[in-house]
Amino acid sequence: MPSPTAPSTSPDAAALPRATVLGYPRIGRDRELKRALESHWAGRTSAADLAEAATALRAATVTRLRDLGLTEPSSVPLDFAHYDQVLDVTLALGAVPERFAGLVDPAASTPLGTDVEFALARGTAEQPPLEMTKWFDSNYHYLVPEIGPLTPLAYRGSSRVAHVREAAGLGVVGRPVLVGPVTYLLLAKASADAPAGFRPLDRLDEVVAAYALLLADLAAAGAAWVQLDEPALVSDLWEVPREEVTAATERAYAALTSAAVGEARPRILVAAPYGRLGCAIDPLLAAGVEAIALDLVRGELPAPTAPDGTTRDLSGVTLLAGVVDGHNVWRTDLDAAAATVAALAGVAGGPVGVTTSTSLLHVPHTVADELDDASGDAGRSDLGPATLPARVAGWLAFADEKIGEVLAVAAGPEAAAAAFETNRAALADRATAPGVVDPAVRARAAELSADSFSRGPYAQRRAAQEAALAGLPTLPTTTIGSFPQTPELRLARAALRRGELDAAAYADAMRAEVGRVIALQEELGLDVLVHGEPERNDMVQYFAELLDGFAVTRNGWVQSYGSRCTRPSILWGDVSRPEPMTLAWATYAASLTDKPVKGMLTGPVTILAWSFVRDDLPLGETANQVALALRDEVADLEAAGIGVVQVDEPALRELLPLRSADHEAYLDWSVGSFRLATSGVRPETQIHTHLCYSEFELILPAIDALDADVTSIEAARSRMELLPAAAGFERGIGPGVWDIHSPRVPSVEELVELLGLALDSVGERQLWVNPDCGLKTRGYAETRASLENLVEAARTVRSRVG
Ligand code: MET
Ligand SMILES: [Zn+2]
């Protein structure tokens, strides 16, 4: 075991700062990066213009972080990426998939440019981009590396080196941040040409050799510390068994620390955000990394003994206590955080640093942008009227405010007495504010019994539904809910927001669209119709705006992927439904046709997953509150004669905890909340659900337990791969046959073929015919052509099965 070089905790250049953050939003307070990227992609600006804008944004960020108080050496994280931090490592390693090889000169070892970067991120006319998937349990998406036995893996230079020099030019010793080698390879998938059994982790040694060169480059540029993010260590969701992950971690970091600190490398901080590190700390200790950042919001203090009974020696390592939540927007309880830091110092046997639990990538820039200009607190006049109640804003800390919290905790309750005092007052205000606890909501939740979560036996429901929906053919056709969001619809919404269109005129425009969507579906011959969701800006925000207990921000943008941002709602109080939310649209649509119209709701888990949730109530209880509001909506729809209701849960897989030990509890409350929302109906009312975006094998039993009468699920891209595993399903299932992620129109033949594959696994009485997901991002040309083919394919297969 290499002997660790312990950094001292005295304030010299080698010491890790007492206060830092693991990362900062990259998109810019006014989404400068988004605009710079999109105008470059649209051909309006050159690569040099983009580089200039990005340099200016980095300089503004470094200066801002310093001005906010991150003044110690190495306390400012340098984590800027044009598009994605995982893609940055792919570029540094030259790990370009074979299909893009033509873009790269293999002989040269120069850094890859933005042409290659954006080809991998966005695809080219000929080649599809890297796949994109969710980053741990966040709503950020990274680009999945594709690694095979022959994929190039040699250091080609990293943009971080220039970023270190830029910061130095501003008088700041920055701390470059990179995804670590173990996490990089665990996030990768085997390339299409890799032999069976090949795993990207098999190429660890080459990747580590490349990182060693990168580290040397960073040291030469003046970096005293580097931060390597290893969130993979807190997760069990890998195909590679944990012992192998542990062994790989020790091997990788022993190799990296074997170089001398100084010219050959900076000191190494390994960050383990998003959960409990547990025993995965041992290989890091054994390898002698200089510092480890622990997520103490989700995770816990290291136990004094390792599983083998030996005492853990923490004397050689600096620990950073991640006590400020990087993943949510609430003010930290500073007293509790200070106590946790003290407890960690007790375990560590010496002083520890203070940081965020994760990068601040997941929260907006600053609460100041949500305050009314009149508040005088840096209010912005260019953002329109404030949308967040001022009182709620007082309970929040976004990225900039969280930096203040880290500094306050590091200083301690005496030195930062004023900050602690303000904090206590804000927390007390939140605890007692009306709406945070709504006695009527709590009373209703307390009355729930097992009956509230279950419907009658399926056989009985099926018979009742067959009678109620007697006009439906076998293999009924339907869509997932949304129809194309045309420029006219977006313009109408913008005009409503600006006050140029009044609510009545807006509603008329939406009703007209519902009329067009119903007429189109009748013309195409679809069987179960939808109203098309024209009135919804977003499938979660639409409900958040109508439910009590939620607030929306005006500038609370968070990067979702590349240049895309979302503005999650903030769930701050007990949830209830002041009035029906979708009823008028559904009944209007139903009045235009004799065919069944499917009501359309977003499920409780998805509403929580895509909002900032409260931290003062267990998620399961919040989910039940949302479920009860939805249950009332379902009841209203049923009473108004809507006999089919779909409750979408595309995020069911996304919230699955990273540790297997936590799965059961999660699936219990998440499945429970869906059942609570949907089980109040009569047997003849048909409940649908819809899932997409993820691989669902792992949670098939939970999907079954939702007990929906019909489940539509994304399946076209994977060519029905999931279905054999779903063979035990007895209820209706609609595997998507049209991949709606591109404008490509699937032919009747290929749709027939996919339906044939589906029928290998599920019975013809169970099979529904539908696209993979909603059509809101599609245009009408391909929508019409694809749905025509879909209806035709269903007819063809129907005539075969009789
Ligand atoms: C991401 S799932 C989307 C479901 C929604 N009903 C729609 O059709 O858009
Ligand atoms: Zn979907």
Image (cartoon, rainbow, N blue to C red):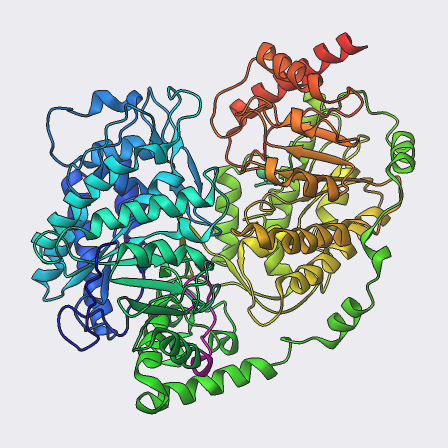
Q: Is residue 47 above or below residue 467?
A: below
Q: Residue 230 placed where, x, y %?
A: 35, 51
Quadrant showing the C terminus: top right
Q: Nearer the viewer, residue 286 or 22?
A: 286
Check if residue 328 falls in the magenta segment.
yes
> How many numbered tags mark residues here?
0
Q: Residue placed farthest to the front in the image?
A: 309
Q: Is residue 634 above or below residue 524?
A: below
Residue at (66% x, 17% y) in the render: 755
Q: Residue 619 placed where, x, y %?
A: 62, 62
Residue at (91% x, 32% y) in the render: 463
Residue at (46% x, 80% y) in the render: 336
Q: Nearer the viewer, residue 652 or 155?
A: 155
Residue 84 visible in the shown view: no
Q: Residue 26 placed where, x, y %?
A: 30, 55
Q: Residue 233 placed where, x, y %?
A: 41, 51
Q: Quadrant of residue 2?
A: bottom left
Q: Is residue 417 above or below residue 97?
A: below
Quadrant showing the N terminus: bottom left
Q: Answer left or right for 593 relative to 104.
A: right
Q: Nearer the viewer, residue 424 or 798?
A: 424
Q: Quadrant of residue 317?
A: bottom left
Residue at (75% x, 21% y) in the render: 475
Residue 428 visible in the shown view: yes
Q: Answer left or right for 443 relative to 463.
A: left
User: Which contiguous range is marked in magenta?
Assistant: 324-336
Q: Magenta residues: mostly which secondary structure?
A: loop
Check if residue 545 falls in the magenta segment.
no
Q: Answer left or right for 340 relative to 47.
A: right
Question: Regarding ligand 1, which quadrant of the image does it lie in?
Answer: top right
Q: Answer left or right for 130 relative to 724.
A: left
